[in-house]
Amino acid sequence: MPAWSIVQTTPEDMCRAVSGNLGSGACGYNSYCVNIDGRPNCLCPEGYSPLDSLDVRRGCKPNFQLPSCQQNGWESDIASVEFKELNNTDWPFTDYELQTGPEVDKERCKEFCLRDCFCAAAIYNENSCWKKRFPLSNGRQSTAVNRIALIKVPRNNQTTLCPKSKDRSTVVLVVSVLLGSSVFFNFLLLAAISVAIFFIYHKKMLSLQSASTLYGIRRYTYKELEEATGGFNQQLGRGSFGTVYKGVIPSIPKRYIAVKRLDKAEKEGEKEFTTEVRAIGRTHHKNLVALLGFCDEGNNRLLVYEYMSNGSLSSLLFGISRPHWHQRMQIAFGIARGLTYLHEECSTQIIHCDVKPQNILLDEYLVPKISDFGLAKLLLSEQSRAARTHIRGTVGYFAPEWFRKASITLKVDVYSFGVLLLEMICCMSSVEFAMGDQEEALIDWVYDCYSKKKVNMLVENDEEARNDMKSVERLVMVAIWCIQEDPSLRPSMRKVSQMLEGVADVSVPPRPSVFSSS
């Protein structure tokens, strides 16, 4: 008798039968799967409903209007949001940020998600918090899943996608009955209501259009910004093209802003204004400083940004108390994601051209945000070269091709990020290192330590980092790949991000030819 051979089997738990991180999983997006008697059952979390009432497997949709992150969404209105908890539930593969540490409890995890417009849900487990973005995928619920899902939804009194037309029609009906049963009178009443609604809607649309006239960003008057900054009396810093002041939006108490006043005397400042409004106005990413508005009134050109309470990365990195190793790693991951967005995910590619710690700002949770597009060049189809006469950044972070007759490509940002990454590993400024008593540059010293298998010397006084030498060595190898003299050898920022986070392997980097043997 011939032996039977197994050609195909059905998984015992279809909810866990997920290959990689593609697709929605056993159930559709925004739903979760529960295995009951060997059969998958698809359910919607509270605040969501099935896309198809006859087939829940197609996924779920939110019963509320998704937040507009361009207009700050739920971030500035804490009272309007609540979290629905689901025990033993997870949506793997859709997390974009991990917060860990002894201070991270369930309430802190909710707060992390609450402050992030992109966060649709958070998954909490033992001092770890994973932020999840829309759409949620591969959802599953099982006693084997030792995690708590925190679903962010608006409170019951908030506007939803489905207007309560029933209540409105009831009001109209009651009014009609009270005023009489005449068909003609009711017709006039309905006509008057329709005209009133039309004018209210038309007026609202006009006000929205006047408040947002360029790339969906609000236009402020000079007087508004002068009042918001108290007459420009609190200076935060000065960049290549202007001075930055702290301000507050009167309509939103304690909503602080950073107002960049461009130097009106310089023609380059005018070009800078146009570049920043066009570039940043069309972008939105959690690791980019958000442009909230602008002023273009006479000779006054100002840009309004979100305020970053923890200042620049340089102040944190080179201050008295260095950030701990895990914080530095998370900040590096965020910067890499932001640059990946600028390079590959914008409608038009953007080269930052001045990546350095002074241009990385930190919010209240130390989430890094790339700032100052003062030297950014939009890569149009016919443009692959930038004018050297406009270089105003810090030379130590510039790639070699800036000083040669070579094309300026996205790889100049990769080089700058490599230098920045080395600084974050060692908590040393490459500029100050070169000006000290050392006979070699920071990047020379790092490569020498790596080649001699003495990477531990880079984090000599950092106990946390020394206990994680595998990660330290991985980041050092990635940085060395980034600072290769030949731009073609440098990886893309997407590949850099994957290597940093351990998604892609890091091969042994060659010795950058710019270095001399020591």
Image (tube, rainbow, N blue to C red):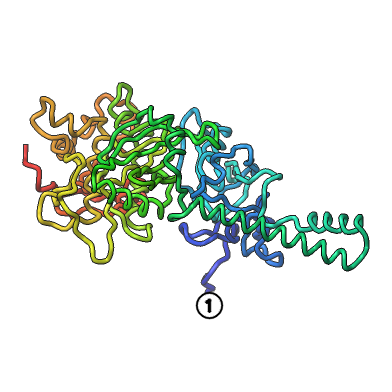
Query: Which image quarter: residue 60?
Result: bottom right
Check disc 1 and report the residue beneath it.
Answer: 2
Which residue type carries mark 1? Pro
Residue farthest toward the bottom in the current orientation of the protein: 1
Q: Nearer the viewer, residue 511 or 439?
A: 439
Q: Is residue 183 left or right of residue 297?
A: right
Residue at 59% in and 39% down? 77
Quadrant containing the N terminus in the rendered view: bottom right
| Residue at far top of view | 320
Image quarter of the C terminus: top left
Residue 220, x across and y down, in percent: 45, 44
Picture coordinates of residue 248, whole percent (x, y): 47, 33
Give the residue furthest to the front. Answer: 298
Q: Nearer the viewer, residue 451 or 46?
A: 46
Q: Residue furthest left?
A: 517
Q: Is residue 471 left or right of residue 43?
A: left
What is the secondary structure assignment of the residue under circle 1? Answer: loop
* Percent of width and height locating residue 151: 61, 45
- Residues 299 and 202: in front is 299
**Quadrant in the picture for residue 278:** bottom left
User: Does residue 477 appear in the picture of this structure?
Assistant: no
- Residue 100 vs 174, above or below: the answer is above
